[in-house]
Amino acid sequence: MSELQTKLPTDIWVTATWDEYIQTIENPAYEKAKGYYHNGQMRIEMAPLGNDHASDHTVIIFAVNLFASIKGIALNGKDNCTYRKTGIKDAQPDVSYYIGENADVIPYGTSIISLDIYPAPTLAIEVANTSLADDKGEKRLLYEDLGLGEYWILDVQNVQVIAFAIENNGSRRITQSLVLPGLEISLLNDALQRTRQMNQSQVGAWLLSEFQK
């Protein structure tokens, strides 16, 4: 194991070369970890195992897929997929989507999605239980640089979605999605808050009625 790996703490950004990052993320010790690389630094996140993160992760996927299906919006979602610009950037968002004209751009049989070949996803979502500060900070800059359409942070502790539109190499807060037109972020927040008092089937039925209005 390299000197870098022997001293590598998880869940913080560490200065590293691209080769060191690839060597680390491919180490069996980090098989279940998520990897990020940006501006000569890497971050290795051990997979969260908690109920709250896992439950909210499930709810946000259901909500987005349901909305797109009802509204007839073309969409393909990815769960913990790796996006790589070789030698420069790497990201593994909790959830990501290709929407609209790019919905079918990634063919089956693709493993790591090379951003040297394919466009970046339209929407990336990070579910933040203990990583909120980083999701608002360095990861937000990473997703700005990757050129997504939108970036959402699902703040588990505060039971809310913080949504950003990405444009002109920057980002700004939004209250309604631009890539999923008509989807109010406040409605997602209501759905998340309802999961604290009722099961996901009941929340799904409520979302269905709201999306059909």
Image (cartoon, rainbow, N blue to C red):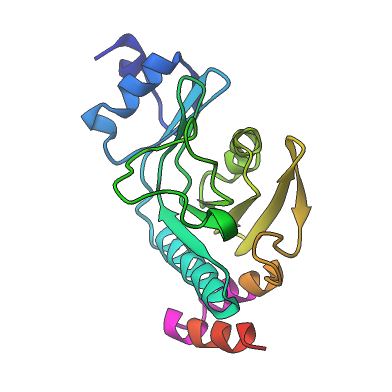
| Quadrant the N terminus occupies | top left
Assess whether residue 35 is covered by the magenta stretch.
no
Residue in view at x 46 percent, y 60 percent: 76
**Left or right: 197 with respect to 175?**
left
Question: Image height check: is 89 above or below 80?
Answer: above
Instruction: From the viewer's side, name the closer residue of 12 and 165.
Output: 165
Residue in view at x 62 percent, y 82 percent: 211
Quadrant housing residue 4: top left
Q: Residue 197: x percent and y percent?
A: 51, 81
Assess whether residue 193 is covered by the magenta stretch.
yes
Q: Residue 107: x percent and y percent?
A: 37, 49
| Quadrant the C terminus occupies | bottom right
Q: Residue 82: x percent and y percent?
A: 41, 40
Residue in view at x 60 percent, y 77 percent: 71
Q: What secondary structure is the magenta-colored segment mainly? A: helix
**Left or right: 201 with respect to 73?**
left
Magenta-colored span: 190-203
Instruction: From the viewer's side, name the closer residue of 82 and 74.
Output: 74
Question: Image height check: is 121 above or below 16?
Answer: below
